[in-house]
Image (cartoon, rainbow, N blue to C red):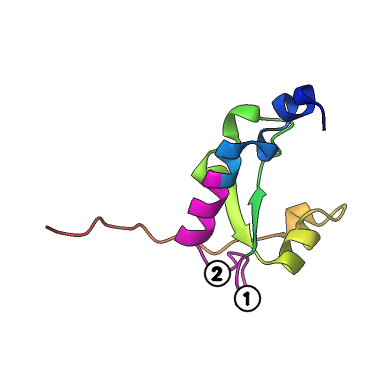
Amino acid sequence: MRFSDWAHDPRKSWRWQRFREMMLGKYPMCERNGCNRIAEEVHHVVSVRLARHLAYSVTNCRCLCCACHRDAHKPGHLSSLTYRPRTVETPPIG
């Protein structure tokens, strides 16, 4: 891959790899409604190609299992995807 290709797609960067691991650690289960599998992919709700500034946004990313991630990228299925609400995490005391 050429250097310029890396600059055009933030998902191929070292920063993305760290962000992806953080997301999968924080949300280890698939976040799609009705799915109880382990998450293996991080999905951008709004495409990085459309909104590059949201590439590393926790609110724009959802952790999905491989099957749900594949469904998310099928034509016409994006609008039918619903996600479980995330619980607000409180920091540990002391």
Q: Residue at x 52, y 66 (%)?
A: 28
**On the image, numbered disc 2 is attached to which residue?**
29
Residue most extreme to the right: 75
Q: Residue at x 64, y 74 (%)?
A: 35
What amino acid is at disc 2?
Met
Q: Residues within 10 Å of mark 2 (few under 14, many from 20)?
A: some
Where disc 1 sits, the SS reads loop
**On the image, numbered disc 1 is attached to which residue?**
37
What amino acid is at disc 1?
Arg
Disc 1 and disc 2 in contact, CB within 8 angstroms: yes
Distance from Cα at disc 1 to Cα at disc 2 = 6 Å
Residue 36 percent location from the top left of the image: 60, 77
Where disc 2 sits, the SS reads loop
Q: Quadrant of the C terminus?
A: bottom left
**Nearest the eye: 28 or 77:** 28
Q: Which residues are magenta?
A: 18-39
Residue 78 percent location from the top left of the image: 76, 53
Residue 45: assigned label? none
